[in-house]
């Protein structure tokens, strides 16, 4: 098993989650606004879990 298929720690909350690190990952099916993608890229060095991504999307939508 390669490292990219092992559980990763969310850079925001520390929760373990699965990430394939490629276009087969669960996150590519999420509709993440460009501003949220930019925020994640600017503020975190690695992936976030689904719960944290959804919370950021919700926060973004409330602030529009």
Image (cartoon, helix red, strand yellow):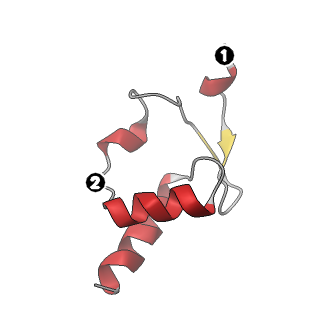
Residue 39 percent location from the top left of the image: 49, 65
Disc 2 secondary structure class: loop
Q: Earlier in the sequence, mark 2 or mark 1?
A: 1
Are there few (<14), some (14-19), or many (20+) residues within 10 Å of tag 2? few
Residue 3 percent location from the top left of the image: 69, 23
Q: Which residue is pictured at 66% across the width and 28% down the height?
A: 6
Judging by the rendered image, the residue that carries numbered circle 2 is 31
Q: Which residue is pictured at 66% across the width and 13% down the height?
A: 1
Q: Which residue is pictured at 65% across the width and 52% down the height?
A: 10
Residue 45 percent location from the top left of the image: 66, 51
Report the residue that reaches farthest toward the top. Answer: 1
Quadrant placement of the C terminus: bottom left
Q: Nearer the viewer, residue 23 or 8?
A: 23
Judging by the rendered image, the residue that carries numbered circle 1 is 2
| Residue 63: assigned label | none
Instruction: Calculate the distance from the C-alpha at mark 2 to the C-alpha at mark 1.
Output: 27 Å
**In the image, is 6 to the left or to the right of 55?**
right
């Amino acid at each position: 098993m390669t490292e990219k298929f092992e559980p990763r720690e969310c850079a925001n909350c520390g929760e373990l989650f699965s990430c394939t690190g490629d276009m087969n990952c669960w996150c590519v099916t999420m509709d993440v606004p460009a501003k949220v993608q930019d925020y994640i890229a600017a503020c975190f060095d690695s992936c976030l879990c689904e719960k944290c991504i959804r919370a950021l999307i919700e926060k973004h939508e409330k602030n529009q």
